[in-house]
Image (cartoon, rainbow, N blue to C red):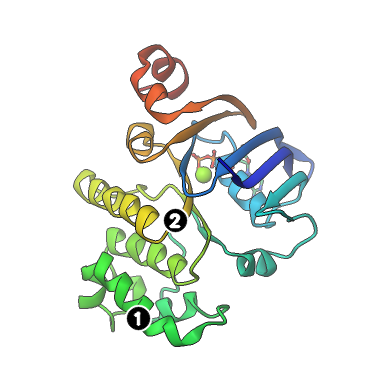
Amino acid sequence: MTALLEVNDLRAQYGAVRVLHGMSFALNEGDVTALLGSNGAGKTTTLRAICNSVSHTGDMVFDGIALRGKSTEAIVKLGIAHVPQGRGTFTKLTVEENLQLGAMVRRNRPDIVSDMDRMYGYFPKLKERRTQQAGTLSGGEQQMLAVARALMLRPRLMLLDEPSFGLAPLIVQSLFDILRKINVEERVTVLVVEQNANLALQISSRAYVVETGCIVLSGNASEIASNEAIRKSYLGC
Ligand SMILES: Nc1ncnc2c1ncn2[C@@H]1O[C@H](COP(=O)(O)OP(=O)(O)OP(=O)(O)O)[C@@H](O)[C@H]1O
Ligand SMILES: [Mg+2]
């Protein structure tokens, strides 16, 4: 299996405070990989480092290209889309304007309308609300919009930070079902950060567990999910 993203000895800090202490991991092309761990472990910081939005060192190679020294914008252009924790939609813009903005850096613009229709296929609620301001959508609808907006970039890799945050269990389950479908149909590789380990493991092939800025466990998602001792010691579930 080829790695789409390889991360080697990643260290990151906020000012003088170091929060990642040499993390190494790889994402296989086409896979969903889960990044799990408790509050403050460094999961969000890891995604920020991949997008170069936090000070860091270490080597990251995306599809054979070194990310070192590249701006966040250049990284987006390479095909890495980030759905940040807390959703990240443009609240004053409509649903449709948010989707259009998602495709801004793309070159193949004629396909944008058909891509938008495909997104409305995944998320029919967004179609009903296409002229509504994003800030007035429900939490679940905003999360769907954030995912759809990221996909409008036609990314090779999508980084999802806590997509289940603040959503009711039924909505979360349906969002994760759609994420799995999107992973297959859009052939997009996914790195998903989640507090809800059980759910993330359901849609992932591999998982990494982070504790205080270090990877303390990695393995096959179904093996981790079925190993009660590991779940209890590392995931608290
Ligand atoms: N902008 C910042 N400035 C200073 N410290 C920060 C900043 N963002 C995060 N930190 C610190 O870095 C550490 C890792 O935070 P991070 O947000 O990566 O954790 P996380 O694993 O995503 O946690 P959560 O599950 O609560 O979202 C924490 O101790 C946090 O307080
Ligand atoms: Mg976080």
Dividing the picture into quadrants, the one containing residue 66 is bottom right
Q: Which residue is mark 1?
A: 114
Nearer-N-terminus badge (2/1) = 2
Q: Amino acid at mark 2?
A: Gly
Residue 228, x across and y down, in percent: 35, 14
Q: Which residue is mark 2?
A: 86
Alpha carbon distance from label 2 to label 1: 28 Å
Q: Does residue 92 appear in this view?
A: no
* Helix, strand or loop under label 1: helix
Asked whether mark 2 and ligand 2 are closer than 8 Å, the reply comes as no
Q: Residue furthest top?
A: 229
Q: Amino acid at mark 1?
A: Ser
Q: Nearer the viewer, residue 75 or 197?
A: 75
Dividing the picture into quadrants, the one containing residue 22 is top right
Q: Nearer the viewer, residue 211 or 166?
A: 211
Asked whether mark 1 and ligand 2 are closer than 8 Å, the reply comes as no
Q: Residue at x 28, y 64 (%)?
A: 141
Q: Residue furthest bottom?
A: 110
- The mark found on residue 55 in the picture is none
* Helix, strand or loop under label 2: loop
Q: Residue at x 38, y 34 (%)?
A: 201
Q: Nearer the viewer, residue 68 or 212?
A: 68
**Viewport quadrant of the C terminus:** top left
